[in-house]
Amino acid sequence: MTTVFVLNGPNLNLLGRREPHVYGNTTLDDIETLVREKAGTLGAAIMFRQSNHEGQLVDWIQEAGAQGAGVVINAGAYTHTSIALRDAISGSGAPTVEIHISNVHAREGFRHRSLIAPVSVGVICGFGPMSYVLGLEAVHHVMTERARQAKPSQH
């Protein structure tokens, strides 16, 4: 069974109340429910976590890599500032999809640069809570393909 860590960075615990004109009214608990439902259809196990602390996110990324799990991460503001998260993703070996609820490229200029995108397998942004579901589908696909390619061919 594929395991995916769905990691949420700073202030995402405020979803549903924080800037609803940008992020909508959906709470992080609502998003977790959506992700778990999709995981069930994919046959994937989910570790859904949120922290406002960079080091905790680093620990979870390393844990995912050590377990051979994938990562879907909404790193929030750390996307644009954290070399530590970049290094954790790069060093852990965990296939990672960066996601965002809003379209960061339609927002302030400082949000256009991601430090973690270059070490992620892909980026999904602007689809609201569905960004999480799309991220889960994407990392599950990548992990399934990698596992298939790793199997020795039988002739």
Image (tube, rainbow, N blue to C red):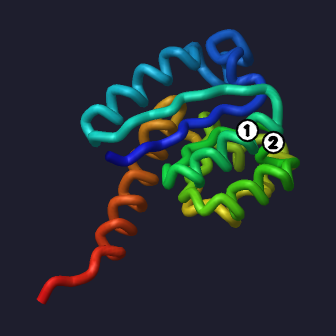
Q: Which of the pair 133/104 is nearer the observer?
A: 133
Q: Quadrant of residue 119?
A: bottom right
Q: Is residue 18 above or below residue 46?
A: above
Instruction: State the residue at coordinates (68%, 56%).
Output: 89
Q: In the rendering, at what x and y percent does residue 99 appear?
A: 59, 44
Residue 93 is tagged as none
Q: Quadrant of residue 88?
A: bottom right
Q: Which of the pair 43/82 is nearer the observer?
A: 43
The residue tagged 1 is 57
Q: As shown in the figure, which amino acid type bears the numbered disc 2?
A: Tyr
Q: Which of the pair 21/48 is nearer the observer?
A: 48
Apparent side of residue 42 relative to residue 24 in the rendered image (left or right): left
Nearer to us: label 2 or label 1: 1
Apparent side of residue 25 relative to residue 42 in the rendered image (left or right): right
Q: In the rendering, at what x and y percent does residue 126 appear?
A: 58, 41
Instruction: State the residue at coordinates (85%, 55%).
Output: 83
Instruction: State the residue at coordinates (29%, 74%).
Output: 151
Few, some or many residues within 10 Å of mark 1 (<14, 14–19, 20+): many
Q: In the rendering, at what x and y percent does residue 104 appear?
A: 70, 44
* Disc 1 secondary structure class: helix
Q: CA distance from mark 2 to mark 1?
A: 10 Å
Q: Are marks 2 and 1 in contact (CB under 8 Å)?
A: yes
Residue 78 is tagged as 2
Q: Farthest left residue?
A: 155
Instruction: State the residue at coordinates (57%, 47%).
Output: 64
Q: As shown in the figure, which amino acid type bears the numbered disc 1?
A: Leu
